[in-house]
Amino acid sequence: MKGRMQHTIAKPVRIEGVGLHTGEAGKMRFVPGATGSGVRFVRTDLRNSPEIEVRPENAHFDPRAGRRTILQQDGVQVHTMEHVLAAVAGLGIDNLRIETSTMEIPEGHDGSAAPIARALLGAGIVEQDQPVRHVKITKPVRWSDNGIEMSAAPYSGFRLSFTIDYDHPLIGTQSLSLDIDPESFLREIAPARTFVLERDVAALRQAGWIRGGRLESAVVVGADRILNPEPLRFADEFVRHKVLDLLGDLFLLGGPILGHVSARRSGHQGHVAFVKFLKESLPLPGRRIGGSRDEWDITAIMGILPHRYPFLLVDRITSLVEGQYVEGVKNVTINEPFFQGHFPGHPIMPAVLIIEAMAQVGGMLLLNSVEDPNDKLMYFMAIDGAKFRRPVTPGDQLRFKVTLLKLKNRTSKMRGEAYVDDQLVAEAELLAAVVDKRPS
């Protein structure tokens, strides 16, 4: 159940290059990131060096900007970062500060992610002291628009599938499906170069794009032959580069994915739209406006737990570390239906419901660990050592911390504690099992 640990680089490393579309020369510096800080870009060319976090709400696509992905935060933008993010995602780097001296990322080496990956590997990749926070695909999700099709499904690892269909004899229809890890990324995806049809080059330049494009920075596909001196690196290099772009664009979700994502005939615009669609469709952390990246709002909780009114007793998850612990909140109000009878004129939250709320918080930890929580339930098996130290009344906020003590197969033992104003009000050890839902 416990996932891999977070990673960053061991020391700073620098890359110089040219922006593919702007043609502007610049420098990019990768700096180790603190545990839990995520990946962020820093515009060192602007006053006060503003930062742009890699998060879905910052993902942006501007059709006037051409074939590129954009991040935007507080009016500050960074362009064409998809190859950089593909290298970060492919190598399993979770925390990184990326300083850039230009708005458009200055890579422009050979049109692939291989030079970036080599630079990051040269800096050394080191393990940190906290587990990674995955973006978990918990249910099948489909999105389509004008012939573009994208989907995501639960999967125990991370798999990408892509199909392209070009009206060109040298490309045609190509498909690839691959489990992504650092080894497969470096071998199968990182070397694949971006490509452009010769018949499109003039129009792209007239529109003000690919000013930094050179024959060395992309595969140029002529009417009947590849115009580059270097031959194709793979027979299906075109679809492999599309997988590379998709890998980078999916990292806009803010972290590594557990799931299988499929795409057909999509590009950066579709990828960004799909990332935003996933954010709204899945129970992802950080959904509450103004909340931290670790928090789960009530909509996200309802995407994991099967409980509904009047028996949903969790309002927010404030922290969840896979395989270790979860923390959550229940706001107790006079509107709770159980106060009508427990007790009239002297409302006290039933002790058994405090334990139930504690168990539901623990259920978020357990059900978030399985491949498809929508097909699962958590059953109580035993409650040991339950103690209640003071009454809980309307106006209290219950804060729970549930720690995983033992997990074997689908059976778990957890210790739960409940606090009000830093005072321990209840505690218990819970034995529970994750089971399949029975067919309706």
Image (cartoon, grey):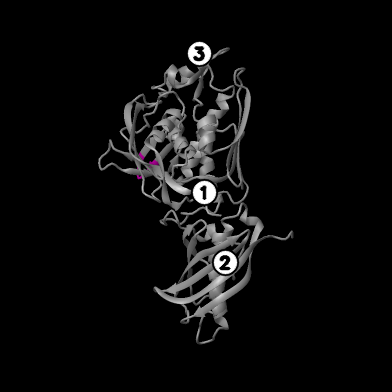
Residue under label 3: 227
The answer to which of 239 and 64 lies nearer the viewer is 239
Q: Are marks 1 and 2 in contact (CB under 8 Å)?
A: no
The quadrant where residue 378 appears: bottom right
How far separated are the C-alphas under marks 1 and 3? 41 Å
Q: Give the residue at the far left of this rendering.
A: 47
Q: Position of residue 26 (x, y in %)?
A: 32, 29
Q: Which mark is residue 413?
A: 2
The answer to which of 282 and 116 lies nearer the viewer is 116
Q: Quadrant of the C terminus?
A: bottom right
- In what element is the residue under mark 2? strand
Front of the two marks 1 and 3: 3
Residue under label 1: 279
Q: Crowding at label 2, few (<14), some or many (≥20) Cα neighbours within 10 Å? A: many
Mark 1 belongs to which amino acid?
Lys
Position of residue 397 in the picture relative to residue 139 (left or right): left
